[in-house]
Image (spheres, rainbow, N blue to C red):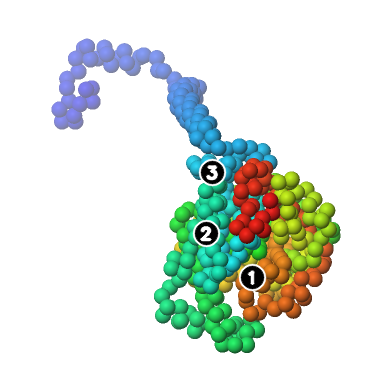
């Protein structure tokens, strides 16, 4: 220590003087900018080598993880196909579960349904077959009106035994509240609502009130059950209503609407743009099920933003068509196609018109609907509050009827024969009303026709013959 402390300085020896002299006289090392840059460059090179090693290790790990994931997915698919030995390619080249094969989680996307019926056995067979093939309907809850004189039990058992469809048969005990609660809910129904049904006697008015309560209670319980079971889209319809792609009319009978002066949000405008674009290339019935189509487009508008989707109805009267038109493109196993309403009745009401078509019907994605809202059903047409938000600005006539140019799906509504129309013995269904509505003729529509071929291809001839039979010798096969 040559500096030492100020009060205790060491003595300088000769050796120390020599060392000091050598230090002073030694040439000084110059630290110019080049030296600094060279040193920094070496530091950067070392850091780069370390980073490259880290990146290389990271990307190697990612590659290994991806390779492992792909191999596991391939293995899962292979095991799924092996496990579903009952699977076979259908008419659209995709794998579907052959009827009777247990579901193992690899089945195609499916639809669910809620169906309240009264003496509709003849209609039920065709309704099940159509939606099984055209919509991939696989989960259905059927509630039987207590005033029914017939039971669908044998039909339900046959479909449960021969297909992978699961049908539950409910009675009032499964969903209706206690009598005191029923009376309370009946009393809450406005008189003007009941008067709209043109009932003249008090007994009929009380009966329609009870039916309205039953409708809401069933829809609520049914939607909740499907939600708890992990389902997605649920169709709320009747046995005379069929879910169909809303393809553009081939005969140029598309309705023309005046542009609304209501302000649309940017989201609504994008949704309408998408609907008009996709309507140009909607698949044919039977080529791709509605459940598969909804799954393929679930991240697009309108599917993404409409968990409750009201759909316009198209009413079909009872005018007969020539036998050659009824039998057109029908498989040989269908020996009596005129017993299927979807093939027999082809003449419909004016598209987009309120007259005859009347109120919408809806599909609901229960997976995106809060359970609390399912306890508050508005009506069977627009059952939930989100339905009103979806269509508030798209109405055709200020009523609960969507514009036909603004939806990807529609509902075909078939009046059928007089026997079918009168089978429920409802007072308001008079002969006069049947005659008036049966004669509608604003053109024909055969968009629904390919379902029969698709159904036979899907289940096979023998199973189709079994499923399309009924207990009253009114079968189509």
Residue at image point 77% right, 76% down = 436
Q: Is residue 60 above or below residue 396?
A: above
Separation of marks 2 and 1 at Cα, in angstroms: 18 Å
- How far across and down, in percent of the image, does residue 346 sit? 78, 61
| Mark sitting earlier along the chain (1/3) | 3
Residue carrying label 2:
153
Residue at image point 21% right, 12% down = 14
Nearer the observer, disc 1 or disc 3? 1
Residue carrying label 3:
100
Query: Could you tell me which secondary element the residue under label 3 belongs to?
Result: loop
Separation of marks 1 and 3 at Cα, in angstroms: 33 Å
Residue carrying label 1:
423
- How far across and down, in percent of the image, does residue 408 sit? 69, 57
Q: Is residue 198 above or below residue 248?
A: below
- How far across and down, in percent of the image, does residue 198 sit? 65, 84
Label 2 crowding class (10 Å Cα cut-off): few <14, some 14-19, many 20+?
few
Query: Could you tell me which secondary element the residue under label 1 belongs to?
Result: loop
| Mark sitting earlier along the chain (2/1) | 2
Residue at image point 54% right, 57% down = 154
Does residue 327 appear left or right of residue 22 in this picture? right
Residue 298 visible in the shown view: no
Separation of marks 3 and 2 at Cα, in angstroms: 18 Å
Query: Could you tell me which secondary element the residue under label 2 belongs to?
Result: helix
* Tag 1 near tag 3, CB within 8 Å: no
């Amino acid at each position: 220590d040559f500096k030492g402390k100020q009060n205790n300085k060491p003595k300088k020896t000769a050796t120390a003087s020599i060392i000091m002299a050598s230090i002073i006289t030694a040439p000084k090392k110059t630290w110019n900018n080049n030296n600094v840059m060279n040193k920094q460059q070496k530091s950067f090179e070392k850091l780069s080598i370390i980073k490259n090693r880290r990146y290389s290790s990271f990307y190697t790990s990612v590659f290994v993880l991806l390779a492992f994931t792909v191999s596991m997915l391939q293995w899962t698919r292979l095991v799924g196909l092996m496990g579903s030995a009952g699977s076979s390619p259908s008419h659209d080249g995709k794998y579907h579960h052959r009827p009777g094969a247990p579901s193992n989680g690899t089945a195609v996307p499916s639809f669910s349904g809620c169906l309240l019926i009264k003496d509709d056995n003849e209609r039920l067979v065709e309704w099940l077959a159509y939606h099984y093939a055209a919509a991939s309907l696989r989960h259905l809850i059927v509630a039987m009106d207590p005033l029914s004189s017939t039971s669908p039990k044998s039909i339900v058992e046959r479909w449960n035994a021969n297909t992978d469809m699961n049908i539950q048969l409910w009675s009032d005990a499964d969903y209706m509240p206690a009598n005191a609660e029923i009376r309370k809910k009946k009393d809450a129904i406005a008189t003007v609502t009941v008067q709209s049904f043109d009932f003249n006697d008090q007994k009929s008015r009380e009966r329609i009130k009870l039916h309205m309560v039953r409708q809401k209670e069933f829809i609520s319980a049914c939607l909740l059950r499907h939600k708890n079971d992990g389902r997605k889209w649920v169709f709320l319809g009747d046995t005379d209503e069929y879910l169909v792609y809303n393809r553009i009319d081939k005969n140029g009978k598309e309705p023309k609407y005046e542009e609304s002066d209501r302000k649309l949000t940017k989201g609504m405008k994008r949704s309408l743009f998408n609907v008009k674009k996709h309507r140009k290339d909607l698949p044919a019935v039977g080529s791709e099920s509605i459940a598969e189509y909804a799954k393929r487009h679930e991240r697009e508008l309108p599917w993404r933003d409409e968990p409750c989707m009201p759909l316009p109805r198209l009413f079909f009267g009872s005018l007969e068509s020539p036998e050659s038109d009824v039998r057109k493109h029908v498989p040989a196993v269908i020996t009596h196609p005129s017993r299927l309403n979807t093939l027999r009745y082809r003449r419909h009401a004016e598209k987009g018109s309120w007259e005859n078509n009347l109120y919408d019907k809806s599909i609901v994605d229960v997976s995106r609907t809060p359970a609390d809202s399912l306890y508050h059903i508005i009506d069977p047409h627009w059952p939930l509050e989100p339905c009103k938000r979806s269509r508030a600005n798209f109405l055709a006539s200020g009523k609960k009827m969507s514009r036909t140019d603004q939806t990807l799906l529609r509902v075909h509504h078939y009046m059928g024969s007089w026997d079918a129309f009168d089978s429920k013995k409802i007072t308001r269904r008079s002969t006069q009303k049947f005659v008036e509505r049966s004669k509608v003729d604003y053109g024909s529509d055969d968009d629904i026709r390919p379902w029969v071929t698709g159904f036979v291809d899907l289940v096979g001839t023998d199973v189709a013959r079994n499923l399309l039979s009924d207990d009253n010798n009114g079968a189509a096969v």
